Amino acid sequence: MPIVVETLTTPSQQDLQDLARLYADAPAWMLAGPEQALALVSAALEDGSLIAARFNDRLLGAARLQREDVAWQLSDLCVRSLTRRRGVGLRLVNEAQRLAQEAGAGLRLFSKQESAEMNALLAPLNLKLDVAQL
């Protein structure tokens, strides 16, 4: 079964549990703790910007995709530690890139800190990571 990327609008209880586990696995520099993860997920669900990678009805990765006129912004990308380096992050970025292109917009990727993992993920895509506090 392939990894399906979708915009989450009405997550199930299982989805919410998966998101909590997923962002609990986030690097310390990305989120200060569970409260910040909950705030991120809540805000992204509220404005319709949360995209998630699903495999076998479970969420393995998520990111915030904010749709702007000229350049869309992908941020807060996180993949469960158990499934890292298996293409989940790449699938999220590729789908965000496809959706932005379809809308005639570019895609900018943001991170709160430079990381070797993000740079390795983006290198084959010829995308640059912007380091900024969003």
Image (spheres, rainbow, N blue to C red):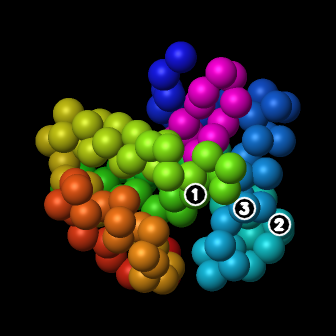
Which segment did they paint magenta? 46-61
Q: Which residue is mark 1?
A: 78
Q: Position of residue 69 (x, y in %)?
A: 24, 52
Of badges 2 and 3, nearer the viewer stands 3
Specify whether 23 is left or right of 7.
Answer: right
For the question of whether residue 49 can be seen, the reply is no
In 3D space, how far apart are the residues under numbered discs 3 and 1 (Cα atoms)? Answer: 8 Å
For the residues bearing labels 2 and 3, Cβ distance under 8 angstroms: no
Q: Residue at x 51, y 58 (%)?
A: 77
Of residues 127 and 64, the one nearer the viewer is 127
Residue 41 marker = none
Q: Which residue is mark 2?
A: 34
Secondary element under disc 2, as helix, strand or loop, is helix
Callout 1 amino acid = Cys
Task: Give whichever of discs 1 and 2 has the lower sequence position.
Answer: 2
For the residues bearing labels 3 and 1, Cβ distance under 8 angstroms: yes
- Chief secondary structure of the magenta portion: strand
Q: Position of residue 121 (x, y in %)?
A: 37, 59
Q: Which residue is mark 3?
A: 25
